[in-house]
Amino acid sequence: MKIVDAQVHIWSQTVTPPTGKHRKIPQVTAEDMLKEMDEAGVDAALIHPPLSWDPSSQEMALAAARKYPDRFAVMGQFDPRNPANRTLIHGWRDQPGMIGLRWALLQPEEQKLLHEGALDWIWPEAEKEGLAVAMMGGIFLKQFRSIAERYPRLKLILDHCGLNRLGQDAEAFIHLDEMLALAKLPNVAVKATGAPHYSTEPYPFRNIQDGLHRIFDAFGPDRVFWGTDITRMPCSYRQCVTFFTEELPWLQGQDLEKVMGRALCAWIGWNYSF
């Protein structure tokens, strides 16, 4: 079984400190990430450039994808506030290695753009181009639902299980029912990235397994994508893998293969060789 990580970061500088619990180190190169992936048994990974602390990280990610096309692809972004950037969506995937779009929208000023409709031009254009868009939709579920309902052919991805990103244990799941209701919209998928972060218990994080099972039951194997965000995980890369491949008895066979990479690649249009 080949394994594809739905989210990793690489960077060459830290203009500002890495956010949250990300490793406070000057750089993580493509080669550094490949070494960790090889040790964990991960075949390929989707790079999300951390522009908030390294403005050059998107160019670095694309260079990595060009150098290692069988190991990396990129979910990139641009500043949506700059009208000149409107031309970028058309032909976005003409950039070798570029596969889709991702805005975390973590900061209040970024979310204000979303709430005021300043980003509304993006969704129909991305839909026309067939680009998947990932966001931290768990922190603005109503707006996320509205986008999904208005643009039913736009493939959307909820980052980090769609949970309460600042909560752990039961607090992480406070809006789980509202998030699971999105499963009725066929154009919404869930990146099951960062799952270990949501538990204060040691591996195998038993107190979040039921919540993950509910997410899987709602969205199914074609719309749940395993991943790590490894540079901020509280456990080893290998444990991030085996948490899903060995510790979840309800995830087996073809369903496991889909969750561990096949479904992600199909959703975003990454023509990866399985």
Image: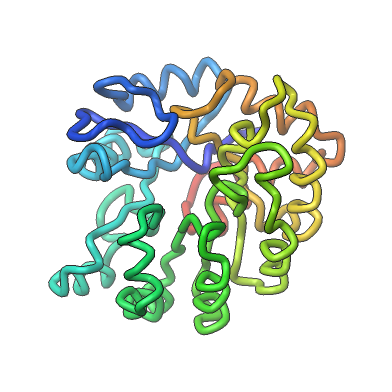
Q: Quadrant of residue 184?
A: bottom right
Image spot of residue 223 (x, y percent)? 66, 57
Q: Is residue 129 visible?
A: no
Considering only vertical position in the picture, is 247 above or below 139? above
**Given the current orientation, which residue lies at the most extreme right position?**
249
Give the residue at x 78% y 38%: 209
Considering only vertical position in the picture, is 269 above or below 122? above
188 horizontally vs 107: left or right: right
Residue in front for this viewpoint, 272 or 51: 51
Q: Quadrant of the N terminus?
A: top right
Give the residue at x 59% y 33%: 197
Q: Is residue 260 visible?
A: yes
Q: Quadrant of the C terminus?
A: top right
Give the residue at x 32% y 43%: 49
Give the residue at x 57% y 18%: 236
Residue in front for this viewpoint, 140 or 64: 140
Considering only vertical position in the picture, is 104 above or below 33? below
**Given the current orientation, which residue lies at the most extreme left position?**
84
22 horizontally vs 66: left or right: right
Image spot of residue 73 (x, y percent)? 39, 44
